[in-house]
Amino acid sequence: MRFPSDDELTGETDALAGLVPTEWPEDFRSGFACLVGRPNAGKSTLTNALVGEKVAITSGRPQTTRHVVRGIVHRPDGQLVLVDTPGLHRPRTLLGQRLNDLVRETLGEVDVVVFCLPAVEKIGPGDRYIARELAELRTPVVAAATKADTVPRDRLAEHLIAVDRLGKEHREFADIVPVSAVTGEQVDVLTEVLLGHLPPGPPLYPEGELTDEPEQVMVAELVREAALEGVRDELPHSLAVAVEEIVERPRREGDQRPPMLDVHVNIYVERDSQKAIVIGKGGSRLRDVGTRARTGIEALLGARVYLDLHVRVAKDWQRDPKLLGRLGF
């Protein structure tokens, strides 16, 4: 991933004249923050809570995030662009290695890093692995004790002490903030802390814009989120989604209804047995996936949607460079 250069940002601002404010407070701050942590540390849920809208898919399964997602937080005194990444982990496949490379590339190009450490779990080898990686950065690192609402206060206090100790072992954290994305507790505090680490500068995106993810990527992510619900443990790592096309149906003259879009999507798995899991008996699970995903897609696109889902087998796609390229990795 590459962030825009100063010249590109200047060009974007010129092109968006009238959209991006031409005046802003003298002490206005803007920049990028990257959320990192081991898989299932609450990064995507926290991204959505900070933005105030759903811009990243969430799931109880690890390795849900496959793409870097930008969420944009607008404040009177600053603009914070959040970059949600896949969880750093010891890779076992080519896909895992590419996801790790994506995280490392992103870490070197942001203004502040948020290290998510869930309060519900003790500090473990995965956290220490990430802490060692972050120790090599010059970028300030803020530790966020996520899921703070899920443990008693005394357990949370113990966790915060353990987080502080982890920082002292590798590299001192700039701040430590307990936060709950579910209840909203301390979300505003974390926002203030992150804004404090950004450089002075103008807004980077127009007011009201919440993400710069392409619509097709977000549609694919909504389908994948729906497909991950209620499946067995091995399936999330073997499931990918690609949008083939989004086509608006012709409308009759005088039709005042919202447009109807035909959205054609392929769901890829690695084995026939996984295909059967996704489809379900008599196609029941696939219909359920379509129903859940369509609601989010219609809200995203502002139109009625006919969602056409097909499940296809792409054997060992996580280890095949050509297939990974076709699927956007």
Image (cartoon, helix red, strand yellow):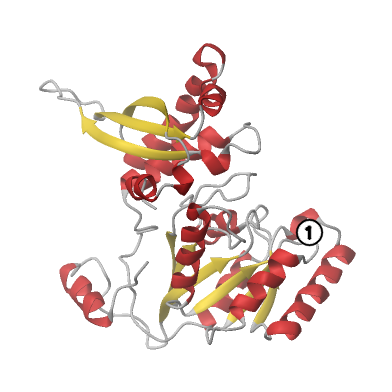
Indicate the position of residue 194 as horizontal and vertical percent values.
Answer: 55, 76
Along the line of sight, which residue is nearer the eye, 107 or 257? 107
Q: Name, please, the residue furthest toward the right.
A: 154
Q: Name, please, the residue furthest toward the top.
A: 282
Q: Let me know if residue 76 appears in the view.
A: no
Indicate the position of residue 273 as horizontal and vertical percent values.
Answer: 56, 25
Left or right of 112 on screen, residue 307:
left
Which quadrant of the figure has residue 255? top left
In this picture, is 39 found above or below 249?
Answer: below
Q: Quadrant of the N terminus?
A: bottom left
Q: Name, please, the residue furthest toward the left.
A: 253
Could you tell me which residue is drawn at 22 percent across and 75 percent down?
8
Could you tell me which residue is drawn at 53 percent across and 26 percent down?
278
Left or right of 306 on screen, residue 69:
right
Residue type pointed to by label 1: Glu
Along the line of sight, which residue is nearer the eye, 328 or 259? 328
Judging by the rendered image, the residue that carries numbered circle 1 is: 121
Left or right of 257 on screen, residue 116:
right
Indicate the position of residue 18 as horizontal and vertical percent values.
Answer: 19, 68
In this picture, is 315 found above or below 288?
Answer: below
Indicate the position of residue 47 as horizontal and vertical percent values.
Answer: 53, 59
Q: How many marks?
A: 1
